[in-house]
Image (cartoon, rainbow, N blue to C red):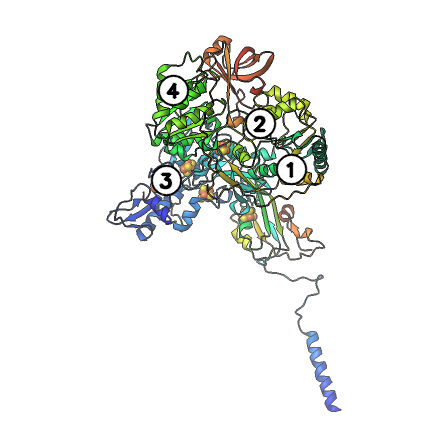
Amino acid sequence: MLEGLKAIAKGMGTTLKALSAPRDTYPYPEKRREYSPRFRGKHMLGKDEEGHELCVGCGLCEAVCPAHAIRVVAAEAPADKPVSWTNRYSIDYEVDLIRCIFCGMCEEACPTNAVRLTPFNELAAYDRESMIADKQELLHPAIRK
Amino acid sequence: MIADAAAKLGIDVPVYCYHEALGPLGACRMCLVQVEKMPKLATACTTAVSEGMVVHTRGPAVDKGRKGVLEFLLINHPLDCPVCDKGGECFLQDYTFQYGPPAGRFEEPKIQKVKDGPINEFILVDQERCVLCQRCVRFMGEYVGEPQLLLEGRGVETVVTTVDHEPATSQFSGNVIDLCPVGALLSVPYHHKARPWNIEREESVCTLCPVGCTTLATGRDGHIVRIEGRPVPDRSWGWLCDRGRFGFDFAVNPSRLITSYLEGREEAAARTTRQVGQWLRDAVSQHGGNSVAFVAGGLHSTEEAYQLNRFAREVVGTERLAVSRDVPGYLPRGLNGTFADIDDADAVVLIGTDPYESVPVVHLRLRDRARALPSLKLMGVAPRSLSRETLRVDTLVTHVGQEAAVLAAALSDAARGHAVLAELVSNGLGDLSGIDGEALAELGSTLVNSEHLTVLWDGLEADVEPVLVALQSVRGDKPTRVLPTWGPSNWRGFERAGFDARIESLTGILEDARDGKLQMLVLWGADLLREYPDQELVRQAYARVPVLVAESLFPPAGHESFKAILPQAGPGEVYGTYVNMEARLQVAMPSVQPPGQARPTKTYVTAWARAMEKPFVLQEDWDPYDDNSGDLVPEESVPREVRPIAPASSAPDGYELITGVLVIENGIPSDFLKPRVPQYPGRISPSDADRLGIRNQAVIKLSREGREMTAAVAVDPAMTPGRIYMPLGLADAPVNALGTGAVNVTVIEEVHSA
Ligand code: SF4
Ligand code: SF4
Ligand code: SF4
Ligand code: SF4
Ligand code: FES
């Protein structure tokens, strides 16, 4: 009998200790984890101070991507309407986020520091189509809700 | 040279300025190697190989030398790779990666030069990226003979630019894009379009003229965006003319047929095809197979012609198969030479044809030969002078229709008493007054005495064929080879596939159609109103034949007469073999899908066979190659007997209309090429222009026996008085409306050049 009570008390003790111990889980989505700024989440395309796109459509990110997730179509900008900081720019830029393995090779290959992986990692969607991020989406990176 | 020897052994020696076709220069110093017993590094491209020589292509000394050269080259080189079209296929990138220094030591600001400046409509120059190898300058100046590029300035300020800063006009200008080892000379249509890793590059063949140059077609996202030359070892350097290099956009031209038309209205492809099948079935069941005729032409491949031929013979049961022809001449296979015959020739005779205009890259080949063999005898027989800045040709200028008689006269003179000649000229030579006797004797001795004779012939005069046969038998064992310069570019392939390429069978079909003996005429890529020499006959045939059907890339002339028009899948969209003027079979791989409703021939003929309820199995693997003849169409023996030629008629009074092929204007539209297509394609001599009161350009009316046409002509000092030249096959001024020969001329409007 006494043995049984002892065991219960020990068990309860452990439970109570654990109740007040710091937690490893988060009550997501009410509370979110802070990630390191180097976390490799969804891509973005950067702009310079004057608002010109940094991407020049060189296609290096496309070439280096081991998952073939990136598609770049370059074009020449009209002389009076520059899009990027030079006369070449990407008229079309897509990242297939289902294919992407978030290795960060594109970021590393980019000579203009245009494509960057942000810490944003909330990538769920209802269909595959919306998992392909187009250029507009990448130029206006999502901010955490 | 050491560089060649190394290349042959598969040893990598980096070069910029050296190109086998251009010869050694030693300008870039990239090719440094170490030769034992030589005190310093030597340039591999200028040092001849000799017995017992020991060469090191790597090693500390060589690597140091290359490193230094590259560091110098990069001093003023912009950091442009991400925006440079050459990026990924650039020799400066490759060599720097392989041999270059890890970093430059130069810290001053780089010199700024012109970026993306124009060389002409097709080419951009980025002077900052140039490594001053001079390949482009030497190609244009020495190889083509049109020195329109030059180096300007000195030292670090040296730049490549055009003479007087005027756009380069040569039709071979595009080759400098392939030649430039770096991204200094760029193609305008390809500018900022793609990268080597996101394109499909397929081996292809240019089908725009009978030369059939080997190309690489770059496809990107379902469109062809670039054509490059493809060198074939020991056969071709991979040069192209601008027509072939930049004229690829015909595939996306707005006037291209991509839907089917049934009785003038747009209709679903399936319905149109079914209806044509129904017509075929009715014609065959009511009037027999021979009431249907097929004419092949245009840019079809040999396989497509073969499929059509099988369908026509087996399912329709007709023997009326012809090739669309715009000139009456025919060349027996046995006389057909190859380009190697140009490289081996000690005499070349041009009959009627101006290679620069009709077979551009052959012109380069001729020039190459003329430079290698200064004693090359280059003669012409034509109604106009064939001489140019770039190629001196002693032309015997004849009147229209006298070429065969002049050649026969020269031949009879030089080989007097030969048996075949008596037969050849048994109808007499006719009136050859005005032909210079001395020139005739020279032509005769060239024809008979040369060791290796190569003839280029434009086919405008059918009687030249028996003269060539006679010439061959007079010359006996000495090679006599002929290269035909007429279209359609794949006519020999159509012949290989089973079509009759002689004009007589086409004429027979048209006459029967005119006389109401044909029920149905199917034109397979052929645009007869524009092509066939007698437009009136075509008109009458079109009006009379009950069912006229065309399959074509572009709406054929007189499209109101057609009951059905089907869109064709073009070269680059289907796998196909094309036979060029050497009778050489060359394969072109598809790089894109046919647009819209355009379908390959096979789709149409199998659908029709189904509509006709006849069994028809197309062998998948018909192969136009022959086991014994390599990539040439099998040889045939040359016919022995010659038919007598018609005597030359006397020179007509007044003006003579003469014609010829102008590849840039050969009827296949291209928006890129538009600025190059002359607005006044016709030509008239200055003295005639004076007489007619024309100063520079004019629109004139040519007429004969009630028929007339208008022609836009420009004054050309090279023209012989009394002749008016109009290119063949212009859509808005078809020479075949009149035919060549004497015409009356009235000036409608004089146009002063700006
Ligand atoms: S994002 Fe960077 S690497 Fe990718 S195409 Fe643009 S500039 Fe090139
Ligand atoms: S020429 Fe070559 S090295 Fe120079 S910018 Fe272009 S790709 Fe880079
Ligand atoms: S433009 Fe190109 S081909 Fe011409 S000299 Fe410069 S690097 Fe050589
Ligand atoms: S020469 Fe003829 S085949 Fe060669 S590129 Fe020009 S058009 Fe094409
Ligand atoms: S390749 Fe030998 S010096 Fe240029």
Sequence order check, earlier mark of 2 and 3:
3
How far, Cα to Cα, is label 3 from label 4?
48 Å
From the top left corner, tell me how far across and down residue B541 is, in percent: 65, 23
Which chain is disc 4 placed on?
A: B
The type of residue carrying mark 2 is Ser
Sequence order check, earlier mark of 1 and 2:
2
The structure residue drawn at horizontal position 53% and vertical position 52%, both measured from the top left corner, is A64
- In the image, is residue B197 above or below residue B323? below
The structure residue drawn at horizontal position 60% and vertical position 25%, both measured from the top left corner, is B508
| Viewer-side label of 3, 4 | 4
- Sort mark 1 into few (<14), some (14-19) or many (20+) by Cα contacts within 10 Å: many
Q: Is mark 1 within 8 Å of ligand 4?
A: no
Sequence order check, earlier mark of 3 and 4:
3
Q: Which residue is mark 1?
A: B598
Mark 1 touching mark 2, by CB under 8 A? Answer: no
Q: Which residue is mark 2?
A: B505
Q: Which residue is mark 4?
A: B412
From the top left corner, tell me how far across and down residue B485 is, in percent: 48, 28
Q: Looking at the rendering, which quadrant does residue B91 occupy? A: top left
Which chain is disc 3 placed on?
A: B
How far, Cα to Cα, is label 1 from label 3?
45 Å
Sequence order check, earlier mark of 4 and 2:
4
- Sort mark 3 into few (<14), some (14-19) or many (20+) by Cα contacts within 10 Å: many
The type of residue carrying mark 1 is Ala
Q: Does residue B284 appear to the left or right of B44 in the view shown?
A: right
From the top left corner, tell me how far across and down residue B712 is, in percent: 55, 17
The type of residue carrying mark 4 is Ser
Number of numbered markers: 4
Q: Which residue is mark 3?
A: B18
Q: Is mark 2 within 8 Å of ligand 4?
A: no
Sequence order check, earlier mark of 1 and 4:
4
